[in-house]
Image: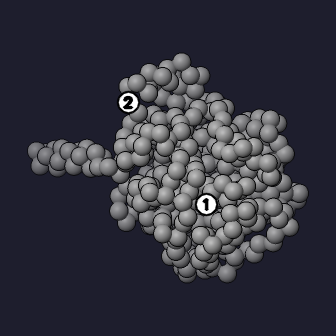
Amino acid sequence: MIIISAIIVLLLIITYFYTKLDKFGNSPNIKKVDSYKNLDNFKDGKFQNLSYTLDLVEGYSMTGILYNFIFTKYPRQRPESEIPSIKTNIKDIPIEDNVMIWFGHSSYYIQLDGVRILVDPVFSGNASPIPGTTKSFPGTDIYTVDDFPNIDYLFISHDHYDHLDYETITNFKGKISKVICGLGVGSHFEHWGYEKNQIIEKNWNESVELADGFTAHVLTARHFSGRGFTRNNTLWASYLLESQSLKIYIGGDSGYDTHFAEIGEKYGPIDISIIENGQYDLAWRYIHTLPDEVIQAGKDLKTKRLFPVHSSKFVLANHPWDEPLIKVSEFNKDTDISLITPIIGEIVKLNDSNQVFTNWWEKVK
Protein backbone atom coordinates (compact mmCIF):
# COMPACT_ATOMS: atom_id res chain seq x y z
CA MET A 1 0.00 0.00 0.00
CA ILE A 2 2.87 2.36 0.75
CA ILE A 3 4.39 1.76 -2.68
CA ILE A 4 1.02 2.20 -4.44
CA SER A 5 0.33 5.40 -2.52
CA ALA A 6 3.77 6.74 -3.40
CA ILE A 7 3.22 6.00 -7.10
CA ILE A 8 -0.18 7.74 -7.04
CA VAL A 9 1.31 10.80 -5.31
CA LEU A 10 4.19 10.88 -7.80
CA LEU A 11 1.79 10.70 -10.75
CA LEU A 12 -0.31 13.51 -9.30
CA ILE A 13 2.77 15.68 -8.86
CA ILE A 14 3.94 14.98 -12.43
CA THR A 15 0.45 15.72 -13.79
CA TYR A 16 0.23 18.97 -11.84
CA PHE A 17 3.52 20.28 -13.18
CA TYR A 18 2.79 19.02 -16.70
CA THR A 19 -0.42 21.07 -16.82
CA LYS A 20 1.67 24.16 -16.05
CA LEU A 21 3.39 23.93 -19.43
CA ASP A 22 2.76 26.79 -21.87
CA LYS A 23 0.60 24.63 -24.14
CA PHE A 24 -2.20 24.64 -21.56
CA GLY A 25 -2.51 28.41 -21.78
CA ASN A 26 -3.72 30.59 -18.94
CA SER A 27 -6.99 31.28 -17.12
CA PRO A 28 -8.64 34.71 -17.12
CA ASN A 29 -7.30 36.94 -14.34
CA ILE A 30 -9.36 38.18 -11.39
CA LYS A 31 -10.16 41.48 -13.10
CA LYS A 32 -11.64 39.67 -16.09
CA VAL A 33 -13.62 37.25 -13.95
CA ASP A 34 -15.06 40.15 -11.95
CA SER A 35 -16.27 41.73 -15.19
CA TYR A 36 -18.24 38.56 -16.02
CA LYS A 37 -20.22 38.35 -12.76
CA ASN A 38 -23.29 40.25 -13.94
CA LEU A 39 -23.59 38.43 -17.25
CA ASP A 40 -26.66 36.25 -17.86
CA ASN A 41 -24.50 33.37 -19.11
CA PHE A 42 -22.06 33.40 -16.16
CA LYS A 43 -22.98 31.86 -12.82
CA ASP A 44 -21.08 30.39 -9.86
CA GLY A 45 -17.77 31.27 -11.46
CA LYS A 46 -18.48 29.50 -14.76
CA PHE A 47 -20.00 30.24 -18.14
CA GLN A 48 -23.35 28.52 -18.71
CA ASN A 49 -25.34 27.26 -21.68
CA LEU A 50 -28.77 28.80 -22.31
CA SER A 51 -30.41 25.39 -21.82
CA TYR A 52 -29.60 23.08 -18.94
CA THR A 53 -26.82 20.90 -20.34
CA LEU A 54 -25.36 17.73 -18.89
CA ASP A 55 -21.96 16.45 -20.02
CA LEU A 56 -23.51 13.02 -20.58
CA VAL A 57 -27.05 12.02 -21.53
CA GLU A 58 -29.07 10.42 -18.75
CA GLY A 59 -28.31 6.71 -18.41
CA TYR A 60 -24.62 7.01 -19.35
CA SER A 61 -21.72 7.21 -16.90
CA MET A 62 -18.19 8.47 -17.22
CA THR A 63 -16.93 5.13 -15.87
CA GLY A 64 -18.68 3.29 -18.68
CA ILE A 65 -17.43 5.75 -21.29
CA LEU A 66 -13.83 5.35 -20.09
CA TYR A 67 -14.14 1.56 -19.98
CA ASN A 68 -15.35 1.41 -23.57
CA PHE A 69 -12.66 3.85 -24.67
CA ILE A 70 -9.89 1.71 -23.16
CA PHE A 71 -11.14 -1.83 -23.70
CA THR A 72 -13.61 -1.82 -26.61
CA LYS A 73 -12.28 -1.96 -30.15
CA TYR A 74 -14.47 -0.08 -32.61
CA PRO A 75 -14.17 -0.76 -36.36
CA ARG A 76 -12.76 1.68 -38.92
CA GLN A 77 -12.15 4.60 -36.63
CA ARG A 78 -9.15 5.48 -38.79
CA PRO A 79 -8.88 5.10 -42.59
CA GLU A 80 -6.52 2.46 -43.94
CA SER A 81 -5.38 4.69 -46.80
CA GLU A 82 -4.52 8.37 -47.03
CA ILE A 83 -7.17 11.07 -47.00
CA PRO A 84 -7.05 12.82 -50.41
CA SER A 85 -5.94 16.44 -50.49
CA ILE A 86 -5.02 19.25 -52.85
CA LYS A 87 -2.16 21.68 -52.26
CA THR A 88 -3.68 24.99 -53.34
CA ASN A 89 -1.38 28.00 -53.44
CA ILE A 90 -3.38 30.19 -51.07
CA LYS A 91 -1.04 33.16 -51.45
CA ASP A 92 -1.80 33.33 -55.19
CA ILE A 93 -5.58 33.55 -54.79
CA PRO A 94 -6.65 37.05 -55.89
CA ILE A 95 -7.91 39.06 -52.93
CA GLU A 96 -11.14 39.87 -54.76
CA ASP A 97 -12.06 36.15 -55.00
CA ASN A 98 -14.59 34.94 -52.42
CA VAL A 99 -13.38 31.46 -51.50
CA MET A 100 -13.08 28.97 -48.67
CA ILE A 101 -10.55 26.17 -48.15
CA TRP A 102 -10.96 23.35 -45.62
CA PHE A 103 -7.98 21.69 -43.88
CA GLY A 104 -9.82 18.81 -42.21
CA HIS A 105 -11.72 18.75 -38.91
CA SER A 106 -12.81 22.34 -38.11
CA SER A 107 -9.95 24.33 -39.63
CA TYR A 108 -10.61 26.48 -42.69
CA TYR A 109 -9.62 29.65 -44.51
CA ILE A 110 -12.21 32.16 -45.72
CA GLN A 111 -11.55 35.01 -48.12
CA LEU A 112 -14.61 37.24 -48.32
CA ASP A 113 -14.97 40.76 -49.74
CA GLY A 114 -11.25 41.43 -49.43
CA VAL A 115 -10.93 40.15 -45.84
CA ARG A 116 -8.72 37.14 -45.03
CA ILE A 117 -10.05 34.96 -42.19
CA LEU A 118 -8.71 31.80 -40.56
CA VAL A 119 -10.87 29.65 -38.27
CA ASP A 120 -9.70 27.20 -35.56
CA PRO A 121 -6.40 26.22 -37.25
CA VAL A 122 -4.78 22.97 -36.07
CA PHE A 123 -1.67 22.12 -38.11
CA SER A 124 0.50 20.38 -35.49
CA GLY A 125 -0.72 16.87 -36.37
CA ASN A 126 -2.11 16.32 -32.90
CA ALA A 127 -5.39 17.30 -31.20
CA SER A 128 -4.28 16.59 -27.65
CA PRO A 129 -1.84 18.10 -25.15
CA ILE A 130 -0.23 14.66 -24.81
CA PRO A 131 2.11 14.06 -27.79
CA GLY A 132 1.17 11.24 -30.14
CA THR A 133 -2.19 10.44 -28.55
CA THR A 134 -4.63 12.01 -31.04
CA LYS A 135 -2.68 11.98 -34.28
CA SER A 136 -4.08 13.31 -37.52
CA PHE A 137 -4.94 10.94 -40.37
CA PRO A 138 -2.30 10.43 -43.08
CA GLY A 139 -2.71 12.97 -45.88
CA THR A 140 -4.45 15.63 -43.79
CA ASP A 141 -1.43 17.71 -42.79
CA ILE A 142 -0.11 19.10 -46.06
CA TYR A 143 -0.36 22.78 -45.06
CA THR A 144 1.98 24.77 -42.83
CA VAL A 145 2.07 28.37 -41.62
CA ASP A 146 4.37 29.27 -44.52
CA ASP A 147 1.59 28.47 -46.99
CA PHE A 148 -0.58 31.35 -45.76
CA PRO A 149 -0.68 35.06 -46.48
CA ASN A 150 -1.10 37.46 -43.57
CA ILE A 151 -4.44 36.91 -41.86
CA ASP A 152 -6.72 39.83 -41.04
CA TYR A 153 -8.85 37.99 -38.49
CA LEU A 154 -8.31 34.71 -36.66
CA PHE A 155 -11.58 33.34 -35.28
CA ILE A 156 -11.50 30.85 -32.39
CA SER A 157 -14.74 29.07 -31.47
CA HIS A 158 -13.50 27.78 -28.08
CA ASP A 159 -10.35 26.68 -26.32
CA HIS A 160 -10.39 22.87 -26.70
CA TYR A 161 -7.19 21.41 -28.14
CA ASP A 162 -8.76 20.36 -31.45
CA HIS A 163 -9.73 24.02 -32.06
CA LEU A 164 -7.08 26.03 -30.23
CA ASP A 165 -3.69 24.46 -30.91
CA TYR A 166 -0.72 25.93 -29.05
CA GLU A 167 1.92 25.00 -31.64
CA THR A 168 -0.11 26.35 -34.56
CA ILE A 169 -1.13 29.56 -32.79
CA THR A 170 2.42 30.41 -31.70
CA ASN A 171 3.76 29.70 -35.20
CA PHE A 172 1.14 32.01 -36.71
CA LYS A 173 1.94 34.86 -34.32
CA GLY A 174 3.65 37.07 -36.89
CA LYS A 175 0.90 36.61 -39.49
CA ILE A 176 -2.21 37.42 -37.43
CA SER A 177 -3.52 40.97 -37.29
CA LYS A 178 -6.51 40.47 -34.94
CA VAL A 179 -7.96 37.58 -32.93
CA ILE A 180 -11.71 37.31 -32.34
CA CYS A 181 -12.82 34.94 -29.59
CA GLY A 182 -15.23 34.42 -26.71
CA LEU A 183 -14.73 36.01 -23.31
CA GLY A 184 -11.67 34.71 -21.49
CA VAL A 185 -10.13 32.88 -24.47
CA GLY A 186 -7.82 35.85 -25.06
CA SER A 187 -6.00 34.97 -21.84
CA HIS A 188 -4.38 32.04 -23.67
CA PHE A 189 -3.22 34.34 -26.46
CA GLU A 190 -1.78 36.87 -24.02
CA HIS A 191 0.09 34.03 -22.29
CA TRP A 192 1.50 32.96 -25.66
CA GLY A 193 2.85 36.39 -26.52
CA TYR A 194 0.07 38.08 -28.47
CA GLU A 195 -0.46 41.77 -27.74
CA LYS A 196 -3.62 42.82 -25.89
CA ASN A 197 -4.57 45.20 -28.70
CA GLN A 198 -4.63 42.23 -31.12
CA ILE A 199 -7.30 40.40 -29.14
CA ILE A 200 -11.04 41.09 -29.38
CA GLU A 201 -13.03 39.16 -26.76
CA LYS A 202 -16.81 39.23 -27.02
CA ASN A 203 -19.88 37.83 -25.33
CA TRP A 204 -22.80 36.25 -27.17
CA ASN A 205 -24.92 38.71 -29.15
CA GLU A 206 -22.14 41.26 -29.53
CA SER A 207 -20.66 42.34 -32.85
CA VAL A 208 -17.35 43.40 -34.40
CA GLU A 209 -17.01 45.52 -37.53
CA LEU A 210 -14.36 43.88 -39.71
CA ALA A 211 -14.53 46.32 -42.61
CA ASP A 212 -16.92 48.79 -44.17
CA GLY A 213 -20.22 46.93 -44.57
CA PHE A 214 -18.75 43.75 -43.08
CA THR A 215 -19.75 42.68 -39.54
CA ALA A 216 -19.03 39.59 -37.46
CA HIS A 217 -21.75 38.68 -34.95
CA VAL A 218 -20.69 36.61 -31.93
CA LEU A 219 -23.51 34.16 -31.22
CA THR A 220 -24.65 31.34 -28.98
CA ALA A 221 -23.47 27.73 -29.00
CA ARG A 222 -24.27 24.78 -26.72
CA HIS A 223 -20.97 23.33 -25.61
CA PHE A 224 -18.32 23.76 -22.91
CA SER A 225 -14.71 24.89 -22.59
CA GLY A 226 -11.53 24.22 -20.68
CA ARG A 227 -7.91 23.14 -20.79
CA GLY A 228 -6.15 21.09 -18.13
CA PHE A 229 -8.49 20.53 -15.19
CA THR A 230 -10.33 23.84 -15.54
CA ARG A 231 -13.81 23.86 -17.11
CA ASN A 232 -16.04 26.61 -18.45
CA ASN A 233 -13.86 29.54 -17.38
CA THR A 234 -13.86 30.77 -20.99
CA LEU A 235 -16.75 31.23 -23.40
CA TRP A 236 -17.55 29.04 -26.41
CA ALA A 237 -19.25 30.72 -29.35
CA SER A 238 -20.54 30.57 -32.90
CA TYR A 239 -20.26 33.42 -35.41
CA LEU A 240 -22.11 34.97 -38.30
CA LEU A 241 -20.09 36.78 -40.96
CA GLU A 242 -22.35 39.35 -42.60
CA SER A 243 -20.69 41.09 -45.54
CA GLN A 244 -22.16 43.00 -48.45
CA SER A 245 -21.96 39.81 -50.51
CA LEU A 246 -22.84 36.90 -48.23
CA LYS A 247 -23.89 35.66 -44.81
CA ILE A 248 -21.75 32.80 -43.51
CA TYR A 249 -22.52 31.02 -40.23
CA ILE A 250 -19.57 29.49 -38.32
CA GLY A 251 -21.06 27.00 -35.89
CA GLY A 252 -18.04 25.95 -33.84
CA ASP A 253 -18.86 22.99 -31.58
CA SER A 254 -22.44 22.78 -30.38
CA GLY A 255 -25.18 20.38 -29.45
CA TYR A 256 -28.56 20.88 -31.07
CA ASP A 257 -30.77 23.45 -29.36
CA THR A 258 -33.17 26.32 -29.96
CA HIS A 259 -30.37 28.79 -30.73
CA PHE A 260 -30.17 27.58 -34.34
CA ALA A 261 -33.78 28.58 -34.99
CA GLU A 262 -33.32 31.86 -33.12
CA ILE A 263 -30.28 32.74 -35.26
CA GLY A 264 -32.13 31.73 -38.42
CA GLU A 265 -35.10 33.87 -37.47
CA LYS A 266 -32.93 36.92 -36.81
CA TYR A 267 -30.34 36.63 -39.60
CA GLY A 268 -31.76 34.19 -42.14
CA PRO A 269 -31.77 33.25 -44.86
CA ILE A 270 -28.08 32.37 -44.50
CA ASP A 271 -26.01 31.64 -47.60
CA ILE A 272 -23.58 29.11 -46.09
CA SER A 273 -23.68 27.39 -42.69
CA ILE A 274 -20.64 25.54 -41.36
CA ILE A 275 -21.84 23.04 -38.76
CA GLU A 276 -19.97 20.36 -36.86
CA ASN A 277 -20.72 16.81 -38.04
CA GLY A 278 -18.37 14.29 -36.51
CA GLN A 279 -16.91 13.11 -33.22
CA TYR A 280 -20.44 12.56 -31.93
CA ASP A 281 -22.06 9.96 -29.71
CA LEU A 282 -25.51 9.46 -28.23
CA ALA A 283 -23.87 9.82 -24.83
CA TRP A 284 -22.85 13.41 -25.48
CA ARG A 285 -25.53 14.60 -27.88
CA TYR A 286 -26.21 17.63 -25.66
CA ILE A 287 -22.83 19.10 -26.59
CA HIS A 288 -22.28 17.71 -30.12
CA THR A 289 -24.76 17.45 -33.00
CA LEU A 290 -25.74 14.10 -34.50
CA PRO A 291 -25.95 13.88 -38.33
CA ASP A 292 -29.75 14.17 -38.48
CA GLU A 293 -29.56 17.17 -36.15
CA VAL A 294 -27.02 18.80 -38.46
CA ILE A 295 -29.61 18.83 -41.23
CA GLN A 296 -32.29 20.09 -38.85
CA ALA A 297 -29.94 22.85 -37.70
CA GLY A 298 -29.43 23.81 -41.34
CA LYS A 299 -33.20 24.06 -41.79
CA ASP A 300 -33.51 26.11 -38.59
CA LEU A 301 -30.83 28.49 -39.83
CA LYS A 302 -32.67 28.85 -43.16
CA THR A 303 -29.42 28.05 -44.88
CA LYS A 304 -29.00 27.64 -48.63
CA ARG A 305 -25.76 25.66 -48.47
CA LEU A 306 -24.43 23.48 -45.64
CA PHE A 307 -20.80 22.62 -45.00
CA PRO A 308 -20.45 19.71 -42.51
CA VAL A 309 -17.08 19.81 -40.70
CA HIS A 310 -15.44 18.33 -37.56
CA SER A 311 -14.57 15.05 -39.30
CA SER A 312 -11.93 13.31 -41.43
CA LYS A 313 -8.80 14.22 -39.46
CA PHE A 314 -8.85 12.98 -35.84
CA VAL A 315 -10.38 10.13 -33.83
CA LEU A 316 -12.32 11.73 -30.98
CA ALA A 317 -15.34 9.40 -30.99
CA ASN A 318 -16.15 5.74 -31.59
CA HIS A 319 -17.93 5.91 -34.95
CA PRO A 320 -16.27 4.90 -38.25
CA TRP A 321 -14.24 7.78 -39.65
CA ASP A 322 -16.48 8.22 -42.74
CA GLU A 323 -19.83 7.71 -41.04
CA PRO A 324 -20.50 11.45 -40.49
CA LEU A 325 -20.28 12.23 -44.21
CA ILE A 326 -22.25 9.14 -45.22
CA LYS A 327 -25.06 9.85 -42.79
CA VAL A 328 -25.33 13.59 -43.34
CA SER A 329 -25.54 12.95 -47.10
CA GLU A 330 -28.34 10.44 -46.58
CA PHE A 331 -30.32 12.70 -44.26
CA ASN A 332 -30.00 15.59 -46.72
CA LYS A 333 -31.47 13.78 -49.74
CA ASP A 334 -34.97 15.17 -49.32
CA THR A 335 -34.04 18.80 -48.62
CA ASP A 336 -33.35 21.83 -50.79
CA ILE A 337 -30.04 22.44 -49.00
CA SER A 338 -26.86 22.03 -51.07
CA LEU A 339 -24.06 20.16 -49.29
CA ILE A 340 -20.49 21.44 -49.49
CA THR A 341 -18.12 18.46 -49.19
CA PRO A 342 -14.71 19.47 -50.54
CA ILE A 343 -11.45 17.56 -50.50
CA ILE A 344 -8.91 19.07 -48.10
CA GLY A 345 -7.34 22.02 -49.90
CA GLU A 346 -9.99 22.26 -52.62
CA ILE A 347 -11.21 25.77 -53.40
CA VAL A 348 -14.85 26.31 -52.48
CA LYS A 349 -16.36 29.15 -54.51
CA LEU A 350 -18.51 31.06 -52.07
CA ASN A 351 -20.56 32.80 -54.76
CA ASP A 352 -21.16 29.67 -56.84
CA SER A 353 -24.16 27.86 -55.39
CA ASN A 354 -24.01 25.36 -58.27
CA GLN A 355 -20.50 24.12 -57.54
CA VAL A 356 -20.48 20.31 -57.48
CA PHE A 357 -18.42 18.20 -55.05
CA THR A 358 -17.55 14.52 -55.19
CA ASN A 359 -18.25 11.89 -52.55
CA TRP A 360 -14.49 11.58 -52.11
CA TRP A 361 -14.76 9.47 -48.93
CA GLU A 362 -16.23 6.57 -50.93
CA LYS A 363 -12.82 5.97 -52.54
CA VAL A 364 -10.94 5.84 -49.22
CA LYS A 365 -10.65 2.50 -47.43
Q: Residue furthest front?
A: 212
Residue 75 seen anywhere in this rendered image of the structure: no
Residue at figure coordinates x 67%, y 59% from the top left: 111
- Give percent across and percent down for residue 361: 67, 74
Q: Residue furthest top?
A: 38
Residue type, mark 1 in image: Tyr
Q: Quadrant of residue 230?
A: top left
Q: In this view of the protein, which residue sits in the foreground, 333 or 159?
A: 159
The picture places residue 271, in percent across and down from the top left corner, at 81, 52
What is the secondary structure assignment of the residue under circle 1? strand
Q: Which residue is mark 1?
A: 108
Position of 345 with respect to 27 (left or right) is: right
**What residue is drawn where x is 81% and y is 69%?**
355
Image-based side of 214 in relation to 28, left or right: right
Quarter holding the C terminus is bottom right
Determine the CA span between mark 1 and mark 2: 30 Å
The quadrant of the picture occupied by the N terminus is top left
Residue extending farthest left:
2
> Where residue 226 appears, x then y in whole percent?
45, 41
- Dot 1: few (<14), some (14–19), or many (≥20) neighbours within 10 Å? some
How many residues crowd around disc 2 within 10 Å: few (fewer than 14), some, or many (20 or more)? few
273 lies above or below 123: above
Query: For the residue labelled by badge 2, is the local secondary structure a helix, a strand or a loop?
Result: loop
* Residue type (three-letter) at the residue carrying disc 2: Asn
Q: Nearer the viewer, residue 4 or 16?
A: 16
Going 66% across and 35% down the picture, which residue do you hit? 207
Write down the residue under mark 2: 29
- Looking at the picture, tell me which residue is in the foreground, 276 or 187: 187
Does residue 199 appear in the picture of this structure?
Answer: yes
